[in-house]
Image (cartoon, coloured by chain):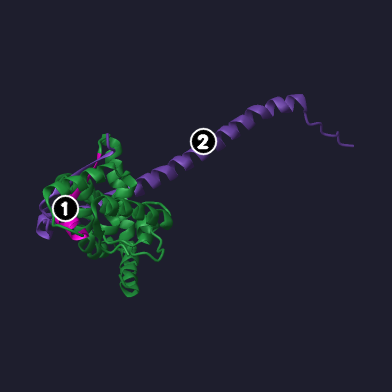
Chain colours: A green, B purple
Amino acid sequence: MTDDEIRKEQEIVERSKKDARAFGELYEKYFDRIFNYILRQTDDEELSGDLCSQTFINVLNNLNRYEFRGLPFSAWIYKIAGNEVNKHYRKNKGKKIFSIEELKVKELVERADEGWDEELINKLIDYMKDLPTDMLQVLELRYFEDKDFKEIAFILDMTESGAKMRTYRALDKLRKNFNIKVKYDE
Amino acid sequence: MSRHEIRLRRKKLTARGTERFRNYDAVLKSHEENQRLKKVLKVFTLFAIILALVMLIIIVIRWEKRIMPQHEKENPVRTLPKS
């Protein structure tokens, strides 16, 4: 996202603080992304729809408290969405779900040797099951949402170096165990 | 036992798939109701604070009135006779 785009969004946010209808533009822009972000953590479309609506209601209710910190406005929406998902899991005491699109996994990793097969995908899923949840959250934001480490740190309430460390540790294991090359990790 | 469950989704949800969940009017309505509730709560809190203050003042005044006669009995004010 360019500085100009961030500034334009900030103008919409300032307008929305006075008139909530102005926020509709940002709602339309980010709805799909936030919906998919939540869906990836719930694997339930109806629930994701509810949590997504609640996220945007919370965003609007707390808009006056929002302070610009040089990050895109979407980082704040992601943070609120993440809090909503966590609240849901705390309330229902269920196991956290990571629902990953097969296509995205294939896009993310390129096999160094032979092509994709079911066995490799299953092995990869087993490997991911053993990763700590916070590590998976970082990987999800980095590779499925294309967020930079500064944004990830803000969304997950951790330091930038902490986010980097978690990502590189997970990727190192991935490379060693699967002989795969991960995109964009340079 | 792992802390989370990993599921693989074969199909990607398209923008058309999310369409039925997209409803900004409902979000706006909910937000406005929330703001109204917040305003009512603010007014109610203010009213409760004022009421508590008034009650405190009344209690202090009554307490002072009750204390004063006793105080006057114990320390009556003596006026000097006119010369």
Q: Which residues are magenta?
A: A96-111
| Chain containing mark 1 | A
Can you say which quadrant of the picture contains the C terminus of chain A?
bottom left
Which residue is at 13% across, 57% downward?
A115
- x and y percent of residue A152 in the render? 35, 57
Residue A167, picture quadrant:
bottom left
Q: Is residue B82 above or below residue A135?
A: above
In the figure, is residue B28 to the left or right of A153?
Answer: left
Q: Would you say residue A126 is visible in this rendering?
A: yes
Instruction: Please identify the residue farthest to the right as the structure is shown.
Output: B83
Q: Is residue A68 in the magenta section?
A: no
SS at circle 1: strand
| Chain containing mark 2 | B
Q: Is residue A7 above or below residue B25?
A: below
User: Could you tell me the amino acid type at mark 2?
Assistant: Met
Specify few, some or many for label 1: CA neighbours under 10 Å numbering under 14, 14-19, or 20 or more: some
- x and y percent of residue A160 in the render? 41, 58
Q: Is residue A100 in the magenta section?
A: yes
Q: How many marks?
A: 2
User: Could you tell me the amino acid type at mark 1?
Assistant: Glu
Give the residue number, with chain letter if any, for mark 2: B55
